[in-house]
Amino acid sequence: MIELLVRINNSIYNLSRVHRLLPWLIAYLVLLPLPKLLEFVLSDYYIDLANRACLFILLCVGLNIVKGFCGQVTVGHIGLYAIGAVSSALLAINYGLSFWVSAPLAVLITGFAGIIVGLPSVRLEGAYLALATLGLGESVRIMIAVTPALGSSTGIMLIPAPAIGDFVFDSFERYYYLVMTLAVLGIYLSFAILRSTTGRAFQAIREDPIAAAVVGINVTMYKLLAFVISALYAGLAGALFAHMPPGYLHHNNFTIIEMVTLLLMVVLGGIGNIWGGVIGAIVVTIIYDQTKDYYFYQPLIFGITMVLLVVFMPRGIGGLLGRMIVKKKFIKNHEDKVIDFA
Amino acid sequence: MFKINKICLGVVALSFMFVSTAIYAGDIRVGITMRMVSENGQKYGQMMMDEIDIINKSGGINGNNIVATLMNDECKSDKGVANANKLVSQKKVHLVIGSTCSSVTLPIVAVTAKAKVPQIIPHSTNAKITKLGSDWIFRVPVSGRFYAGVNAKYVGENIGMRIAYICAADAASQNDCQAMQGQMRSQHGAEPVYVAEVQEKEVDFRTHMQKIKTSNVDGIMIAALAETMARALIQSYEAGMDESVRRIGSSSASNAPVPKIAGDAAKNVFFAAAYAAADKRPIARLFNEMVRERYGIHAPDHDFSQAYDLIRIVEIALNNAKLKLTNSSLADDRVAIRNAIAGIRNYQGLASGPISFCRDSSPVCRDGNRTAVLIGYTKGGEQFETEVLARVTMPMDFGL
Amino acid sequence: MLETKNLSKKFGGLRALWDVNTKIEQGTIHGLIGPNGSGKSTFFNLITGIYQPDLGSHINFAGQDITTRSAHQIAELGVSRTFQLLRLFLDMTVLENVMVGYHCHSPYGILSPIFLGTKVRKAENIIREEMIELLEFLGLAEFADIPASELSGGQKKLLSLGRAIAMKPKLLLLDEPGAGLSPVNIDNLMDTILTLKERYKLTVIVVEHVLKLVMNTCERITVLDHGKKIAEGTPEEVKGNRSVVEAYLGKEMADEEIRRVFTG
Ligand SMILES: Nc1ncnc2c1ncn2[C@@H]1O[C@H](COP(=O)(O)OP(=O)(O)OP(=O)(O)O)[C@@H](O)[C@H]1O
Ligand SMILES: [Mg+2]
């Protein structure tokens, strides 16, 4: 198994030497026919499931930036998701803007909201920060629930589907091409960020804020930046959720339960591990779907899983696999050297 | 390259694991999605399944079994949509029943309309549901557009025009308060005599009550959540207004804490519903007994009665529809079921009035039930009792 | 290069540093010694902006008043340091640790990675090469891709030095670089520091308990005791200073004995 992973890892590496974007292109091309496959083997429903998995991938990848890279505990992410969804929906409905305008605007609005959610991080840490962000996130939901203009108890209906010319993204399959593309792009971007000065600054803050400041990192600004970037992801996921067929929004899609599910995805995948987050999002979405009949126990099972994970597998699936690959490679390199000597 | 093959194989193998149920021709497949997070929700979900079982045991529909899939949507729209998708595209159901929550039913309407599957609603009252113009939707409960006018109609015809209002700040109460004032105005041309806006959890209503007392009103509408309403009711008597001034509750008056906390002050307070357990008709008494025996529920509310009526309506429609039930006839069968439901006229069941549907896709045809029952408390306290005050039937196009 | 006036810091009632006036000349290696708890690390923390000094203090670096600047601004001016407890970024790789040190010299804006620029990629490659070169100098290049947590103690010390050097500082503050190392390793470390000093034209302040090392390498030495500066001068001057000796060993000890310890 590990052998296989190392091999995959190596072949990806080899591909990337041909061209840096080649592995991404191949992954994208492999993912493109997925709806056809799902529809053929299973049914339309699983395309919808794949779409929702893609939304959660965007959320996880975004959350990972602030929580995983930058080490800032936030439990308000779903609130940002809600802001993105509601803003895009309202812009599209009230001002007749097309998705291609309303979604970017919604993403920007969510980015600003990200600053607000991030502000407590300047002074607070750990559990206190978690509480502050939880409060902010939940108050967004309550705002939506009590304000008729934001949908309140009826929700927002008839949110138009995105369209390019005559091509309307109004079926699950068509929407898949949109969300999947953006999800892949989102993953790629998060790698680009992680492997830049910005990403290293985030990680340094997570590891040791004082040492980070001493090497010249503006800790406050980078913390806020992490919140903003993750908010941009949440805003995009939200906008995509709003316009996804059947184009309906309701505040009870943004509760604590959703937040817990999201956290479980990130923790299961491995905090700070991008692929881990992606794996977590997919695995939890599937498990959630398959265990629907045991809904009474779901929150309990999720809670217990989370505790067990934190205790026994703090690095999650992603961390585990990643370390195996690195170790294996390291040992292999050294073995090679030994052989060279002989 | 062979690695990619391996991965693809894995994906395919994995996908096959999801295929849980095989689909047989000859069955009538019904999918139910509803909120089952409360004990009551569980029980009337179970009741629907049991009723379907009974139909099957007594010969099914022209010899065909009804196979029902019951799913929980936790009253969340995304889960409801996912359920509907699963039912429609994977389980290939002939009919979708659901949901209980308007916020879930609303988006599902789009799913069933697109997939061309008939959908029948047990409990959602939001008026917008049938205004979406779907040709596949039918509503068994009384639509919110009728409810909005029921109280005002009754009050205008039986109590009087001089009404004072106490409106708490929570969303539901604000909504009820506005609706009542608007309806009094449009139905009877009556302006409010006095309006007090109070906190969501206000405790002191004495000054308002004194002012209302001196302004000589026919009735007071108290729109507030249960406990706040109970406090206001008690203080209205303490202020010295006797029973000749009628107390009108908002929708939360149906909640048990109102009579329990308010005690005798809850007497004569009434609320609108689609079914009263105090109904004296034999069919209602039999139903109450059945629910008590099977599910241990003392006084079933309209959630139960509507779920029951719905199954009866479905039974009639399925019997009337000419179904082929082959693998290739799914689309035709769905159309046939839709037409059969649309053909139901004057169904008399537990509902307070007859339920009729028709062919057009407008709310006039699809909000089948337009008779609400006004239920009043005859006794407050722990062992509170109710009676049917009146049945109010609204015009078909009311509130459109 | 660096000048402090009346530098003071109180922690509650405790005066960790008390009106310290000192001046460090450009291009020198300056020693900072004193018994445990005498305020040496606090001095560093004030210079690097981790703590704000008390009112009335002044810190001047390369002609600029940096008294109230925040840590990252001071770092940008070219002050870099190591920590007594290293404070490495343990979950990041060895290479990433030094690359973080390069932060202030990164040639692209913080948001450019989002725009997928080729500029970013090219710059990253250049940074990487430069940092690998630095790691090679420190003898850590073969560990570039493993997490810093998996290095040995001595390697971690080298890495923390590497991170400070990657900042291309003008002034380098070393907090007990020799602690926990064997005498041989300390000598090597000192060689490395001297080489680096020459190579990058650094001014160095070093806090060290191994007095022999300080005496041999530093051009000037400042002695702190209970937060106060009690002596300053060349190693010879300091060695002969009675109050210094007292501060270290108490009044009772015989002068001869003390001298022996100092000259080691
Ligand atoms: N953050 C702080 N809060 C309270 N007291 C502190 C703090 N930092 C340092 N001190 C106190 O200030 C005094 C000086 O500490 P400092 O760490 O500067 O000493 P030092 O000379 O570096 O000692 P060592 O040789 O043990 O490293 C000590 O008494 C210490 O307990
Ligand atoms: Mg110290």
Image (spheres, rainbow, N blue to C red):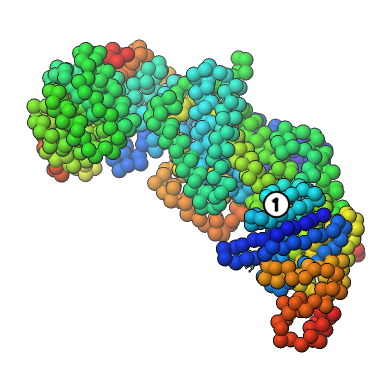
- The chain ID associated with circle 1 is C
Disc 1 secondary structure class: loop
Residue C115: in sight, yes or no? yes
- On the rendering, which quadrant does ligand 1 occupy? bottom right
Q: How many marks?
A: 1
| Residue B277 placement: quadrant | top left
Query: Label 1, on which residue?
Result: C67
Q: Is residue B157 left or right of residue A331?
A: left
> Residue at (82%, 76%) from the top-left corner?
C239
Q: Is residue C181 above or below residue B295?
A: below
Confirm or reject: label 1 Cβ below 8 Å from ligand 1: no
Q: Is residue B380 above or below residue A314?
A: above
> Residue at (20%, 20%) from the top-left corner?
B193
> Residue at (74%, 37%) from the top-left corner?
C109
- Point out residue A10 in the picture as x, y percentages from the top left corner: 77, 47
Residue B352: in sight, yes or no? no
